[in-house]
Image: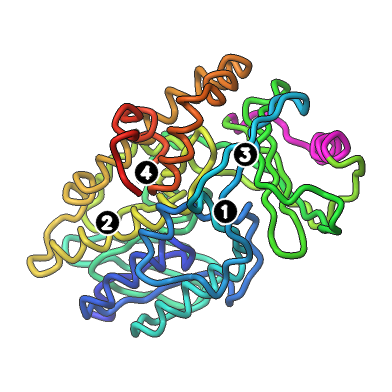
Amino acid sequence: MDYDVVIAGAGPAGCAAAYDLCVNKRRVLLLDRYEFPREKACAGGLTPKTLKALRYSVEPVIKRVCDRMLIGKDMRQKVLLKSRYSICAMTIRSQFDAFCLEKTLKRAAFFHVVKTIERIDETDTHVDVHTDKGTIRAKYLIGADGVNSKVRKLTDAFNKIKKGFAIEGILPMDGTKSAEMEFNFDGAISGYCWVFPKNDHMNVGLYSSLGSEKLSKQKLFRFVKRRFGGDTVDRINGYPIGIGGWDYVPRKHRTVLVGDAAGLADPLLGEGVFYAVKSGQMAAAAVDRVLPEEAGVGPVYNDLISGIKRDLLVCYQTSQWFYQYPGAGYAAMTFFPSKCALVKGFAMGWTLGRIIKQSYRLPFKKI
């Protein structure tokens, strides 16, 4: 047998799975379409819960740490949320992903670049992954290849995936522009506009929880014009975000999906890196548990991610109300007890779903 596990996709989900498997002395191969570093469209915000979940410090690729956050509505109303602790760390995804891959390779993972996965054959004893570079055999396969996952499509593993959408660009920072982290809830879209400051630039963008909603360059330009008085935005990218993972039930004997491939991103805010890392680690734990007997991995993995799925369902139900009534949603978010709970919950590393469900416990918690 060539490998214990093949992982398609070497982003945060794939590396999280590979890292833990290698710690447990499993023979692991990571596949990706690109050499690293490679460009990756992403706002680049890492929440405290993400930093806690990672097995190593990513301080070398952190560009700014934010303890203040502006919450706005239609560019007119704004409330500043302050914390004594970090509520978000800013990175550049291409650098972050390359750093995580480097850490994983140091744990003795193997890495190959393949342009396409052409076919996947799963048997009772192994999985054959047919690529443009040849066939790779392993005992288990983890699909960590993003929202447009080839593994998901070729194995028909999950046909209920939904998609949000984001469009972003880069705005230079010249000292005259705000350097605050900002979420602005604009009633014109089922989502929000964001400003994420880095060291010499800001990442600005729009997010919609509806994949069918058209977020155009013109809408991004209008936001930048209203917010900063100019419309010069560089390196504009649009990308889908995988949601709907609360319905994902892994049914394959030897194949599971993680991160965006399984729709495991927050539909309310579009956060995906935390759920990518956690689901990758849980896939590794599931495989490690069943590998000695070479049993089916699906039921074990499904049990491990049940908490993630419940959390994402809460976020989805909240997003349905929040984006239908953005004025009421903004009022609820900026109401004094709510904003205190939000800031403290983020700083403690709680998920948004947990903050929503257990906010009553936060006054009694210590960070």
User: Which element is circle 1 on?
Assistant: strand
- Check disc 3 and report the residue beneath it: 165
Camera-side mark, 3 or 4 = 4
Camera-side mark, 1 or 2 = 1
User: Which numbered circle lies on residue 45?
Assistant: 1
User: Which element is circle 4 on?
Assistant: loop
User: In the rendered view, does 37 fall on the left or right side of 315?
Assistant: right
User: Which numbered circle lies on residue 350?
Assistant: 4
Tell me which residue sits at (72%, 31%) in the image. Answer: 214
Please give the range of residues in magenta: 210-227
Q: Nearer the viewer, residue 199 or 194?
A: 199
Tell me which residue sits at (33%, 35%) in the image. Answer: 362
Q: Nearer the viewer, residue 123 or 148?
A: 148
- Check disc 2 and report the residue beneath it: 282
Whether 219 is drawn above or below 232: the answer is: above
- Disc with the residue nearer the chain's start (4 vs 2): 2
Q: Is residue 338 within the magenta segment?
A: no
Task: For marks 1 and 2, give the CA distance.
Answer: 22 Å
Whether 59 is drawn above or below 314: the answer is: below
- The crowd level at tag 4 (other Cα within 10 Å; few <14, some 14-19, many 20+) is some
- Disc with the residue nearer the chain's start (3 vs 1): 1
Find residue 116 and report its horizontal and vertical position in percent: 53, 66
Q: Nearer the viewer, residue 298 or 63?
A: 63
Tell me which residue sits at (42%, 23%) in the image. Answer: 317
- Disc with the residue nearer the chain's start (3 vs 4): 3
User: Which element is circle 3 on?
Assistant: strand
Find residue 310 and report its horizontal and vertical position in percent: 30, 34
